[in-house]
Image (cartoon, helix red, strand yellow):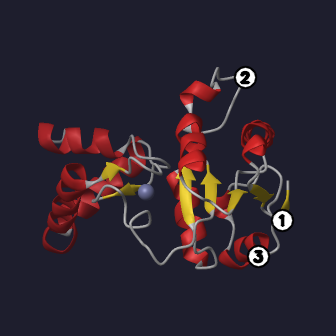
Amino acid sequence: MNSADIQSLIQLLAKLPGLGPRSGRRVALHLIKKKNTLLEPLSAALIKVAQNVRTCSVCGNLDSIDPCSICADTSRDTSICVVEEVDDLWALERTSVFRGKYHVLGGVLSALEGIGPEDLNIVSLLNRMRETSAQEVILALNATVDGLTTAHYIQEKIEPLEIKITRLAHGVPVGGELDYLDEGTLSAALRARRPM
Ligand SMILES: [Zn+2]
């Protein structure tokens, strides 16, 4: 049997998305064999992220500084792109098409899972809309039933503020998560965005 240290490493690795006990064992062994080139730099990176990375108090992005580097970037325009999760933000950033700022909801409304508006960063979005002079709000939510429900809910809340509201164009497959789209498809969906 493995030592307790190795065993606990395997158990933690097995909890990572896409891994399980078997992959956990394989990854653990790989890391131990690559002590200098992988295991030690990885431990250092994990400690750094654990110590420094926080949630941006303005938009919900993850960064080592608060407000995050996107919120702090004065060269960006005043439009705000609303996304479900940070990985959607990352996907949009990879396209380099959008030059505004973001707002991460932290999920979508879901009757099934009991997720209501108060569980998401919707109040902070509305406050932000009122306090800043955003020229456009782009609802870049995933094309799932819950994503669409959430988009309509936000649209109703924002409409009285008379801010232009758009959504990503077709090209985002139904049920498709933004992070899985290739950058060309996502860029096209963003460029051809249309009014809600
Ligand atoms: Zn931010």
Residue 40 x/y as whole percent: 14, 65
Q: Residue at x 24, y 62 (%)?
A: 31
**Mark 2 vs 3, N-terminal side:** 2
Residue 131 x/y as whole percent: 53, 49
Spatial separation of the CA atoms under disc 1 and disc 3: 8 Å
Q: Is residue 167 above or below residue 8?
A: below
User: Residue 111 — which label?
Assistant: 2
Instruction: Please tell me how crowded label 3 is: few (under 14), some (14-19), or many (20+) other residues with Cα within 10 Å.
Output: few
Residue 156 x/y as whole percent: 79, 38
- What amino acid type should be assigned to the residue bearing mark 3? Arg
Q: Contact (CB < 8 A) between labels 1 and 3?
A: yes
Q: Which image quadrant for residue 195?
A: bottom right
Residue situated in front as seen by the camera: 43 or 162: 162
Residue situated in front as seen by the camera: 91 or 105: 105
Q: Contact (CB < 8 A) between labels 2 and 3?
A: no
Residue mark closest to the camera, 2 vs 1: 1
One can see residue 105 in this view: no
**Mark 1 vs 3, N-terminal side:** 1
**Element at label 2:** loop
Residue assigned mark 3: 191
**Element at label 1:** loop
Q: Which image quadrant for residue 81?
A: bottom right
In which quadrant is the N terminus drawn? Answer: top left
Residue mark closest to the camera, 2 vs 3: 3
Residue 34 x/y as whole percent: 20, 70
Q: Is residue 195 above or below residue 14?
A: below
Residue assigned mark 1: 169
